[in-house]
Amino acid sequence: MTPTGARIANIVLGVWLFISAFIWPHTQAQLTNTWIVGLAIIAVALIALAAPPVKYINTALAIWLFISVWALPADMPGTQWNNAIVAILVFLFSLVPEGMTTARGHARRRAIV
């Protein structure tokens, strides 16, 4: 996956997280946490398109989202599963390396030996 693709995937996951906060029941704490973290993931991923080191903020947000699955009161296991899966995916996409570039700024493809 390309770095840009990973940032776009995190944007999509953030949008999904935001929407999911409103499409099924959440406790008040889960609802607030889910939509705020969703918006934060979107904002960070958009900024990371231009400033790649910012992507590590999404790493931290993913860790918090994963912890919050069990730290906040829950009504529905489906909500917990959704947030845990989104957290894992955001975490993984946030760690996609930027790759090597040449002096001209073009991505250099790595040969598989």
Image (tube, grey):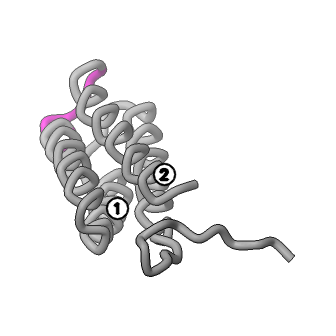
What amino acid is at disc 2? Leu
Magenta span includes 61: no
Q: Which residue is mark 2?
A: 89
Where residue 28 sits, quadrant-wise, is top left
Q: Quadrant of the image for the N terminus?
A: bottom right
Q: Count residues near mark 1 (Cα–Cα under 10 Å), then give few for <14, some for 14-19, many for 20+.
A: some
Per the rendered image, the range of residues in magenta is 24-30
Say whether disc 1 or disc 2 marks the residue closer to the N-terminus.
Answer: 1
Task: Please name the residue shown 38% across and 44% down the image.
Answer: 8
Name the outermost residue toward the top.
23
State left or right for residue 20 relative to residue 1. Answer: left
Q: Which residue is mark 1?
A: 67
Nearest to viewer (mark 1 / mark 2): 2
Residue 102: give x, y in percent of width and height.
49, 78
State left or right for residue 4 relative to residue 110. Answer: left
Residue 21: give x, y in percent of width and height.
24, 30
What amino acid is at disc 1? Ile
Residue 30: give x, y in percent of width and height.
21, 41
Q: Count residues near mark 2 (Cα–Cα under 10 Å), then give few for <14, some for 14-19, many for 20+.
A: some
Q: Is residue 39 above or below residue 57?
A: above
Camera-nearest residue between 58 and 6: 6
